[in-house]
Image (cartoon, grey):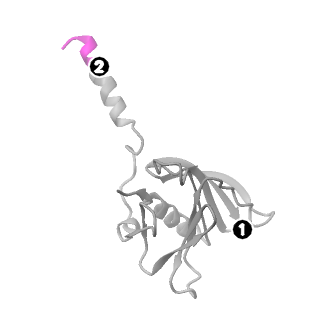
């Protein structure tokens, strides 16, 4: 094999190996137990834990989808949601004691920079990014969630990693 052929093979391998999502970690035991649910009225789906529901709230030119435990007395888990529309806005931190930082987690197959507020052991996380809808609406998604522990934060972000466009 000639040197230029080796170089071409190396470059092709590098391009394939470095495409977005190529270096995802194996699914956790938690993620394997999630049930895929179709998002009402959209061509998107998300994996949710047993006992969680998803509800739609419709605005004049946007929709917000909330997911949370069906048992409203369950205060140990996490809750989240996402805005789908063309004019998203970030939420302020819950209070002045929150420490803002960035964390990496997947959404739509891309390892994104999420805003994480640590509010004395309670966590708020959010991200605004393009919706990958392929149409003018919804142009953006604002994903957000709350939880009371680092373990629940990890689970919440794993749920968001399952959000995907469907046909």
Query: Percent position (x, y) of residue 137?
Result: 53, 53
Queried whether the magenta region covers residue 2, the answer comes back as: yes
Q: Which mark's residue is nearer the viewer, 1 or 2?
A: 2
Q: Which residue is mark 1?
A: 120
Q: Residue 150: give its label.
A: none
Q: Nearer the viewer, residue 24 or 88?
A: 88
Q: Which residue is mark 2?
A: 8
Q: Nearer the viewer, residue 155 or 112?
A: 112
Q: Residues within 10 Å of mark 1 (few under 14, many from 20)?
A: few
Instruction: Name the residue located 47 percent from the left edge and 78 percent from the top edge.
Output: 52
Queried whether the magenta region covers residue 89, the answer comes back as: no
Alpha-carbon span between mark 1 and mark 2: 52 Å
Q: Residue furthest left?
A: 1
Rendered image quadrant of residue 141: bottom right
Secondary structure under tag 1 reads: loop
- Image: magenta residue range: 1-8
Query: Percent position (x, y) of residue 133?
Result: 47, 51
Most common secondary structure along the magenta stretch:
helix
Of pointers 1 and 2, the one earlier in the residue sequence: 2
């Amino acid at each position: 094999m000639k040197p230029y052929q080796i170089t071409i093979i190396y470059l092709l391998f590098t391009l394939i190996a470095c495409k977005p999502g190529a270096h995802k970690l194996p699914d956790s035991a938690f993620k394997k137990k999630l049930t895929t649910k179709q998002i009402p009225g959209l061509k998107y789906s998300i994996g949710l834990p047993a006992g969680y529901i998803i509800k739609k709230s419709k605005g004049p030119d946007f929709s917000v989808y909330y997911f949370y435990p069906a048992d409203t007395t369950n205060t140990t888990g996490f809750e989240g949601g996402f805005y789908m529309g063309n004019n998203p806005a970030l939420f302020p931190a819950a209070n002045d004691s929150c420490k803002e930082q960035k964390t990496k987690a997947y959404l739509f197959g891309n390892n994104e920079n999420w805003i994480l507020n640590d509010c004395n052991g309670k966590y708020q996380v959010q991200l605004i990014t393009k919706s990958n809808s392929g149409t003018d609406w919804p142009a953006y998604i604002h994903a957000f969630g709350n939880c009371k522990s680092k373990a629940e934060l990890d689970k919440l972000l794993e749920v968001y990693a399952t959000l995907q466009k469907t046909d």
